[in-house]
Image (spheres, rainbow, N blue to C red):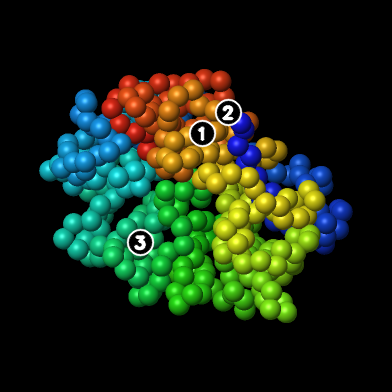
Amino acid sequence: MKRIIILIILFALFACDKSQLPGGRRDLWDPHSDHSYQREPPAPAKDSVLLTGVEYPSGYDWVRDTAHSAVSAHILLLKGNAELLRVPAGNGTPWPTDPDCHRIWDGHLYTFTTSEGCTIIGRDGEEVLRYSAAESIRGFAIDEEGHILTLGQNLGGPGLSFRKDGRVMFLSDGGTVSGSLDRGLPRSGALYSDNGHWYFSYKEEGRIHLVEDYLERALPEGDHLDVVVYRGKLVRALRRKTNGRTMLSIYYGSFELPLGPTFYREVRSATFVWNGNQIRLMADVAGVRYVWDAGNSRLTSSGGESYFELYPRLGRDAAVVTDKGRVVHIDPYGEPPGEYALVSGACAASAGNSFFVALSGLRGNPGVLLRDSVATVFHFNGPLTSLCLE
C-alpha cells in the first residue's frame, strides 16, 4: 500500500542555558548541532520485556465485547510469552478488563477500579489502597520511596485530585486533567516527573493550570494550548492574536522558538509528546495536522487523516498509525503482516535502536510483540494491553 506519510514536529531541546552552548542560540533547535550529550537508553534484554493482556473464554468476541463486565476473564502479566501471573477479572471479581485499568510498575501488576463511591488499587491481584472518591485514574506512579501516586478525574464530571497513598495533596473541584494513561508517553500518563519534581496540568474555565508537586505554579500570561516542564525548563505552546489573526508560538523558558513563515489560521490544539531525551509537538491548525520541522524552522502540513501514536527518539522517530481501529503502518517496520489493533498507546516503547510494539490480533489472529526483526506470538483469546521495559 502507499506509504502513509508521518510528519512530526521535530522539537529537540537542550536542558542547558543558551550561554553554555558552543554555537549560540541557534543550537537550541538546530538538529545539526552537537547532540552528543543526548544518549538513548540501551535496549533491554529480550527477557526483560513485561506485558499485560486480557484473556477471554475461547470463542468470545472480545472486539465486540457485547457481554462486557458480565463475562469472566483474566488479566495476564507476561514476560515474553511466559505467563508470570493471572488475575481474575470481569464477572464477579473486583477488577475490570478495560486496558487503561491496569499497568506494570517495578515488575508488579497494578489494577484500578471503583466500587460504592471508592477508588481501589490492587497489586498482583490484591487490594493495596482504597480511598473515598470514585475517580478515573489518569496518572499513576510509584515514587522512589514506594509511595503510590495517583492523579484521578472525578467520574461523570469535573474535579480532580492528586494523591499520595490515597491522601489528597492537591484538589480542584472544577478541573479536568490534561492527558490520560492510554497514551504512549509519558509512561505515568498525565502525571510525570522532571528533575525530582512531579507535574501535571489541568484545564478549568478555559485556562491551563500547571501543578508542581502539590502547589500550582504561576504561568506567564497567554492563551496556552499545552504546557510541560522538560529538563527543568518551562515549555509552552500558545495562541496569539496579531492584527486580528491567530498564530502559534512556542516558548522554551523565556526564549521564543522560531516557526518560520507564520500560519495565520485557526489554531485549534497543540500537544507535546516527550520522553527523557526527546520532545515533540503536534498541532491542529484549521483542522489540518501541522508539524514543526526543526531543520528548516517552518510549519508544514501533514498527509492523511489517520491517527498515530508517536514515540520520539534520536534520528528517526517511531510511530504506529491506525485507521478505523486497524494498524496500517508501523514506522520503522512498515505495513503489519495481517490485521491488528493497537488497543493503547502504552502498547509500544522505544529504547536504544529498538522499537517494541504489542499488537492485538483481529479476526481471530493471535497477538504479536514486534522487536526489530523478531516477532513473539501470543495464542490466548484477547488483547495485549500494555508493555514495560524493565
Q: Which residue is mark 2?
A: 1
What's the distance in space between the residues labelled 1 and 2, CA to CA?
A: 9 Å
Mark 3–mark 1 distance (CA, rounded to whole Å): 33 Å
Q: Residue at x 36, y 68 (%)?
A: 160
Q: Kindly indicate whether the residue at mark 2 contacts the one at mark 1 (C-beta within 8 angstroms).
A: yes
- Residue 122 position (above or below residue 71): below
Q: Residue 295 at what x, y percent from top left?
A: 78, 48
Residue 44 at what x, y percent from top left? 53, 30
Residue type at mark 3 is: Gly
**Please, which residue is most extreme toward the left here?**
92
Q: Amino acid at mark 1?
A: Val
Q: Which residue is mark 3?
A: 152
Q: Earlier in the sequence, mark 3 or mark 1?
A: 3
Q: Quick one: 196 or 85, which is closer to the camera?
A: 85
Residue at 25% from the left image edge and 32% from the top image edge? 61
Amino acid beneath label 2: Met
Q: Quadrant of residue 222?
A: bottom right
Q: Position of residue 108 (x, y in %)?
A: 35, 39
Disc number lying in front (3 or 2): 2
Q: How many marks?
A: 3
Dots 3 and 1: beta carbons under 8 Å? no
Outermost residue toward the right in this view:
23
* Sooner in the amino-acid sequence: mark 3 or mark 2: 2
Q: Are marks 3 and 2 in contact (CB under 8 Å)?
A: no
In terms of secondary structure, where does tag 3 sit?
strand
**In the displayed structure image, the side of residue 204 where residue 153 appears, left or right:** left
The residue carrying mark 1 is 328
- Whether residue 204 appears in this view of the structure is yes
Residue drawn where x is 44% and y is 36% of the image: 326
State which mark lies toward you, 3 or 1.
1
Q: Is residue 81 left or right of residue 18?
A: left
Q: Quadrant of the N terminus?
A: top right
